[in-house]
Amino acid sequence: MPRTLIVDDHEPTLAALAALVEAEGWEAHRAASIEDARRHLDDARFDAVLVDLNLPDGSGMSLLEEARSAGTAAVVLITGQASVASAVDALRAGVTDYLTKPVDFERVRVILREVRGSTGLTEEIRALTDRQQESGRFGSLVGRSPAMQRVYELIARVAPTSATVLVSGESGSGKELVARTLHDLSRRSKNDFVAINCGAISPALLESELFGHERGSFTGADRRHRGVFERAHRGTLFLDEIAEMPPELQVKLLRVLEAGDFTRIGGETAIDADVRIIAATNRKLDQVLARGLLREDLYYRLKVFHIAVPALRERPDDIALLADHYLELLAEQEGPRRRLTEGALDALRRHSWPGNVRELRNAVYSAYLLTDGESIEAGALPVDIAGGSGVLLDRSSVTLPVGTTLADAERRLILTTLGYHEGNKVKAAEVLGISLKTLYNRLHEYGFWASGTHTT
Ligand SMILES: Nc1ncnc2c1ncn2[C@@H]1O[C@H](COP(=O)(O)OP(=O)(O)OP(=O)(O)O)[C@@H](O)[C@H]1O
Ligand SMILES: [Mg+2]
């Protein structure tokens, strides 16, 4: 039977927590002070320690190291609402999770179950961290630069907790991939990761997208709608472009984060919001505050834990690694394995990558498609990357000098369209007005053997 040590000087809380822990099938041991807790830790090993931050003889944090070295798998801190900031420091220091007072017993239950099931998770994260130098990856994130290693460290630290995370970084730098990795390495990974782009939905619709609505709650609401808070239940909710959220919704969001529940528009009953929030912005954080894009209280609430994803130009060592990663993926999808020549690599290294990893991926993709042989020359890269010799590849148009043969024009149009739709052949065929079969035949002629089985 797993063993818990509960440390709290408030007898009623202690008794209630002990009853709850026992009801979950754990052994509950009690201590009312740090000194008392130390005696317990000296005597026996505990699987989890739940400890109040404010104890008569000091801070509950002082037990962290002892509990850890005594082999405790999870140390959960109990704090007042006012001390969320110290809870964050605690997470950084290695606390597994924290609970705010008044303690939500359902959360305790969830945490205990997660602790029981999460020993494997800790091992998975440790294995990823150990292998990251050699493999150059951390989950689906590729990169070996010191800047990315710092990102991996932060992910490893915060993923298993329930802390809210704010991810910042330039467009295309990998914020969403970081958010997904956080989810995959969390105790919520078996449940959904739901993403919503606050900047892409009209302010009028955003509230209903977030919280849902009841039938008839406004004109056009002809049926009940479940918002992302409901759909992400027990999972992770990714609030992308958070700084674009209208101020009045920011107030509502903050309320939900604080109360832990919400109501659908036009609804009466409060719905439990058991979601882990990850928010992202591609704006500079100081601007977000200076320009008043985010309310200060919401900003600090979201920024409980902050991960800044570095721009690609700040980690040039990762360029070759990423390019090779995409060429490998292309070989799996399309057939031929192609490699960049030194000249092409040089061009990639010299470029400043305003569009970050997304721009790199697109450049590699189009150069691959425009190359016949095994080596990709600098000349196959877009002109803004390769300079004069590069392909004038506005990704959304094809320029054809007089003298181009009809066959070549067709080939260029097909490949550009395919590149524009990021390799989606169904979409490209539709846009080109040809059958999927014809598209496959052409690609075959151009030296790409058709992958997959869609040959109809
Ligand atoms: N470190 C990385 N390793 C592998 N692929 C990456 C990495 N970073 C980004 N990518 C890829 O680059 C593309 C853009 O990444 P992502 O969508 O996460 O960026 P973003 O920061 O959310 O961009 P935006 O601000 O435009 O929404 C995706 O295809 C993603 O898979
Ligand atoms: Mg994004």
Image (cartoon, grey):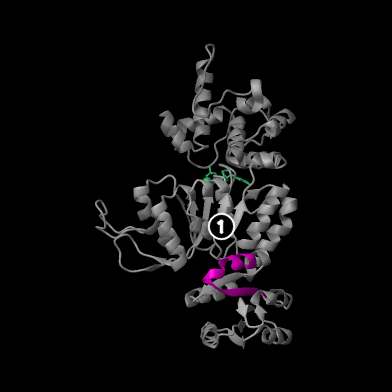
On-image quarter of the C terminus? top left
**Residue sitting at 24 percent across and 52 percent down?**
219
Give the residue drawn at x 65%, y 60%.
Answer: 156
Residue 346 vertical placement versus 128 (above, below) = above
Q: Residue at x 50, y 42 (%)?
A: 453
Q: Front-most of 202 and 410?
A: 202
- Is residue 371 or residue 102 the one in the foreground? 102
**The N terminus lies in which quarter of the figure?**
bottom right
Residue underneath mark 1:
303
Q: Position of residue 74 (x, y in %)?
A: 63, 74
Q: Residue 28: where, in percent of width, then height?
A: 59, 86
Percent x, y for residue 270? 36, 68
The residue positioned 34% from the left and 61% from the top of the image is 264
Residue sitting at the far front? 290
Visible residue check, residue 137? yes
Q: Which residues are the magenta region? A: 73-90
Residue furthest to the top in view is 403
Indicate whether 258 appears above or below 312. Answer: below
